[in-house]
Amino acid sequence: MDPLLLAHVALFGVSGVACLLSLPRAFRIKHPGTRQGLVALLLAVVLWSLGYVGYLVAPTDSLRLTSYTIGFIFAFVAVAAWTYFCAAYTGRRPRQAPYRWSMVGVFLLFVLLKLTNPLHNLYFTTAWTTDPFPHLAIQHGILYWVTLGLSYAVIAVGFFMLLERFYHTGTDSRPLITLATVTGVPAVVTIFGDQIDWLLPLMYEPPGVAVFAVGTLFVYVRRFEAVQLTGGATPPPSSSTAMSACGTSTRPRPRCSRRSRTRSANPSTPSIPSSLLDSTIRGCSRPARKTNGTTTSCLSPRSPPAASRLDSW
């Protein structure tokens, strides 16, 4: 076997095996959404890598083409699984995402176009070549680049969610940031693979996913879990949510009712009096006063809590 061909086979073979061996650890993750997303991602990368290995070593052109198509489809599945995993890990609810059925429809449309590529050849065409070694060469078409661009846009959203979580957590997440960065490096090889003589025009993300899986599930597993536990079940605060709906200060505020939030959004309506707001920040909706020899305040059983007073606005 040609050394360069062997290197390609080893690259995808080792990546697939690493993801396969990581599956038992992934099944131990307690958070259901994170577990489902990561397991789906690892399974997709295993089949993606297996399809590419079959494409490289299959004895006939029909088997090579079938294997490549399988790998091609599961590469797209891996994109969806990656986004699901990132959303679940960062406290979002991917199953309640807006327009999710539209996204599923677009996903199935692209899968159908890949399966029917022999009819339209818009994804890729094939031709036998001996450069850099004898193999069935793939020439990518317009739909390939459209799909690749959309996939990278979706993947970037997942990376943003992860890095946002790592940034806002109180634990040392620098190793996880490094792993996430390494995961995205092979995308550069995928984009410029056509310009490198000794590289086949394939998608080289499986090694990056394998490094991420081994790093998070075997090396930094406690830190990986700690970041999610630190973040809780809700997304990390953004600059907009850090500002209270009842004012411009970043100090902790009591919960605001829907009516108070509506007043803040509509400048034409009267705002909450500053004296009431300032006293509420200190824990009371009004100052203490003495009536018939008895001192009453917002903490007195006769007066409702501050949050309830604000809810009445």
Image (cartoon, rainbow, N blue to C red):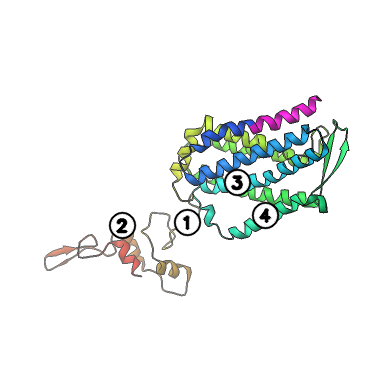
Q: Earlier in the sequence, mark 2 or mark 4?
A: 4
Q: Is residue 300 left or right of residue 26?
A: left
Residue 298 placement (x, y as % from top left) = 24, 62
Residue at the image point whose x is 42% and y is 62% from the top:
247
> Which label number is shown at residue 108?
4
Q: Nearer the viewer, mark 2 or mark 4?
A: 4
Q: Are marks 3 and 4 in contact (CB under 8 Å)?
A: no
Say what secondary structure mark 2 lies in: loop
The amino acid type of the residue labelled 1 equals Thr
Say what secondary structure mark 3 lies in: helix
Q: Quadrant of the N terminus?
A: top right
The crowding category of the residue bearing disc 2, from other C-alpha atoms within 10 Å (few below 14, some 14 to 19, many at least 20), is few
Q: Is residue 14 magenta?
A: yes
The amino acid type of the residue labelled 4 equals Leu
| Whole-number angstrom distance, CA of label 2 to CA of label 1 | 21 Å
The amino acid type of the residue labelled 2 equals Arg
Q: Nearer the viewer, mark 2 or mark 1?
A: 1
Residue at the image point whose x is 44% and y is 60% from the top:
248
**Whether residue 275 can be seen here:** no
| Whole-number angstrom distance, CA of label 3 to CA of label 4 | 14 Å
97 and 309: which one is in front? Answer: 97
Residue position marked by numbered label 3 in the rendering: 81
| Whole-number angstrom distance, CA of label 1 to CA of label 3 | 28 Å
The crowding category of the residue bearing disc 4, from other C-alpha atoms within 10 Å (few below 14, some 14 to 19, many at least 20), is few
Residue position marked by numbered label 1 in the rendering: 241
Residue 283 placement (x, y as % from top left) = 29, 58
